[in-house]
């Protein structure tokens, strides 16, 4: 994220040169992938801690939640990596490319995060009651 400010984040798009804009998009591309990887790792790490706490029945639920979150995270990373064909089409403006629109993919990511929040909140209350 700190690199983003060096390459145009925080400035209006009209003030960026074409080269600065392409560099910004390239850094942004890898920033999104890094963010999605970190999100998956953090959620999996929390669930791994639950495995240490819970016993039998809740342990199965935790394992299933870990599998679902892991698969969801891997799917999001793969979708993000192959958003454009060719891949550099994400940041190169002049080449011919075929891309998935970013906005729907970001909404799907947000919907998945919102959908999993009740699972985490429920499990937090179980820890307190446990």
Image: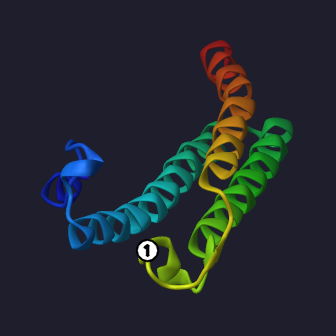
| Pick the front one: 123 or 1 | 1
Image position, residue 125 (x, y; %): 66, 16
Q: Mark 1 points at which residue?
A: 93
Which coloring applies here?
Answer: rainbow
Q: Can residue 124 be seen in this view?
A: yes
Residue at left offset 72%, top offset 56%: 72
Residue at left offset 29%, top offset 64%: 21
Q: Can residue 54 be seen in this view?
A: no
- Above/below status of 73 relative to 130: below
Question: Circle 1 sits in a helix, a strand or a loop, which is it?
Answer: loop
Image position, residue 19 (x, y; %): 23, 73
Report whether 39 appears left or right of 102.
Answer: left
Report whether 115 appears left or right of 13.
Answer: right
Residue at left offset 54%, top offset 82%: 87
| Pick the front one: 15 or 82 | 15
Residue at left offset 68%, top offset 64%: 100
Image position, residue 48 (x, y; %): 59, 50
User: What is the quadrant of the C terminus in the image?
Assistant: top right
- Above/below status of 59 relative to 22: above
Image position, residue 90 (x, y; %): 49, 72
Report whether 93 appears left or right of 87.
Answer: left
């Amino acid at each position: 994220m700190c690199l983003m400010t060096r390459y145009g984040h925080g400035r209006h798009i009209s003030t960026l040169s074409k080269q600065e804009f392409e560099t910004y998009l390239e850094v942004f591309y890898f920033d999104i992938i890094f963010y999605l990887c970190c999100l998956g790792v953090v959620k999996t790490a929390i669930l791994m801690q639950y495995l240490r706490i819970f016993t039998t029945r809740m342990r199965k639920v935790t394992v299933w939640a870990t599998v679902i979150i892991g698969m969801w995270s891997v799917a999001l990373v793969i979708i993000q990596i192959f958003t454009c064909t060719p891949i550099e089409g994400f940041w190169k403006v002049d080449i011919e490319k075929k891309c998935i629109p970013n906005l729907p993919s970001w909404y799907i990511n947000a919907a998945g995060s919102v959908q999993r929040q009740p699972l985490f909140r429920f499990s937090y209350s179980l820890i307190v009651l446990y």
